[in-house]
């Protein structure tokens, strides 16, 4: 009897193991199918947007976009130099510019439920052309923004102050959606460009959050999301504290 019980237990364990393996295999295949489906959808969408690619990449638009980036970067350089002369410190610690990649444009249009065409992209996406400047302190962000707003060859389209009102994710930055005048072959052209201004601490946070955004939808990501929200609050408080200390030092 005991012998029989032992054999039944072994058989039961074997069956359980086989079932678990089958479940694992099924889960793996479903995941693979999901990835393949997403890739196929993305591929089809990008195919549909071939006119978009032609006009966006290596095009007149990208040349003008690069000019707008260079011009704004130079303006930021000048602003920093003026502050350096007056305050003896670098207000802008780092700056970069980029043209949004074709696949990011497709993803953003799809996310907004828009047609994959060039005119829609130019009209509805603010950051096709973008510059990011990292400032030392929160008040520096507003000083730089004030000087940018005063420039005669810059028009302010929209200001999004995610420092005063952080996003639900915890994201903090000041976004200026601008139009900048470029002297081109047949006269002046106004090019839309987004300037993101943030502190080094906000940038540190945003870079990590950006990595997580590619993993959204997974269970672990939700928990990390919450942790990141908490960190954003700590970073906001830290930026304020650092600013208070700097002001005290300025007054010595
Ligand atoms: P990527 O890959 O960084 O370029 P709207 O202008 O209102 O129609 P949009 O463009 O989503 O919609 O505006 P929003 O929310 O101001 O975001 C513009 C950009 O700010 C984003 O571009 C990001 O670069 C950055 N951003 C906004 N929210 C977050 C956030 O929660 N976390 C991080 N890390 N960055 C954020 P993209 O194209 O979404 O992304």
Image (spheres, rainbow, N blue to C red):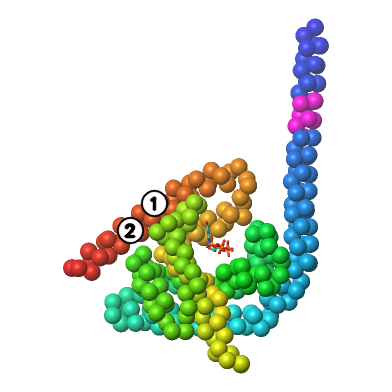
List the residue tagged with mark 1. Answer: 234
State the residue at coordinates (28%, 77%): 87
Label 1 Cα crowd, 10 Å radius (few <14 / some 14-19 / many 20+): few
Image location (x, y in percent) of residue 118: 69, 73
State the residue at coordinates (76%, 29%): 17
Ligand 1 near label 1 (Cβ, under 8 Å)? Answer: no
| Pointers 1 and 2 in contact (C-beta within 8 Å) | no
Magenta range: 15-21
State the residue at coordinates (79%, 35%): 22
List the residue tagged with mark 2. Answer: 240
State the residue at coordinates (76%, 17%): 9
C-alpha span from label 1 to label 2: 10 Å
Which is nearer the N-term, disc 1 or disc 2?
Answer: 1
- Where's ligand 1: which quadrant? bottom right
Q: Is residue 174 left or right of residue 138?
A: right
- Image quadrant in which the C terminus is located: bottom left
- Image quadrant in which the N terminus is located: top right
């Amino acid at each position: 009897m005991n012998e029989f019980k032992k054999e039944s237990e072994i058989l039961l364990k074997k069956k359980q193991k086989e079932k678990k393996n089958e479940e694992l295999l099924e889960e793996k295949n479903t995941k693979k199918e999901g990835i393949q489906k997403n890739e196929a959808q993305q591929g089809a969408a990008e195919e549909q947007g071939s006119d978009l690619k032609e006009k966006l990449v290596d095009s007149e638009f990208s040349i003008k976009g690069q000019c707008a980036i260079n011009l704004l970067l130079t303006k930021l350089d000048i602003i920093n130099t003026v502050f350096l002369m007056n305050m003896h410190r670098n207000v802008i610690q780092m700056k970069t510019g980029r043209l949004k990649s074709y696949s990011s444009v497709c993803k953003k249009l799809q996310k907004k439920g828009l047609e994959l065409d060039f005119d829609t992209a130019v009209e509805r996406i603010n950051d096709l052309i973008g510059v990011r400047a990292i400032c030392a302190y929160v008040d520096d962000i507003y000083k730089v923004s004030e000087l940018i707003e005063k420039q005669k060859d810059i028009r302010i389209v929209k200001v999004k102050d995610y420092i005063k009102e952080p996003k639900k994710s915890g994201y903090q930055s000041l976004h200026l959606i601008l139009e900048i005048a470029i002297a081109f072959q047949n006269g002046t052209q106004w090019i839309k460009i987004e300037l993101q201004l943030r502190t080094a601490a906000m940038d540190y946070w945003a870079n990590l959050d950006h990595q997580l955004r590619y993993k959204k939808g997974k269970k672990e990501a939700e928990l990390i999301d919450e942790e990141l929200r908490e960190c954003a609050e700590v970073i906001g408080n830290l930026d304020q504290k650092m600013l208070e200390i700097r002001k005290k030092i300025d007054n010595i």
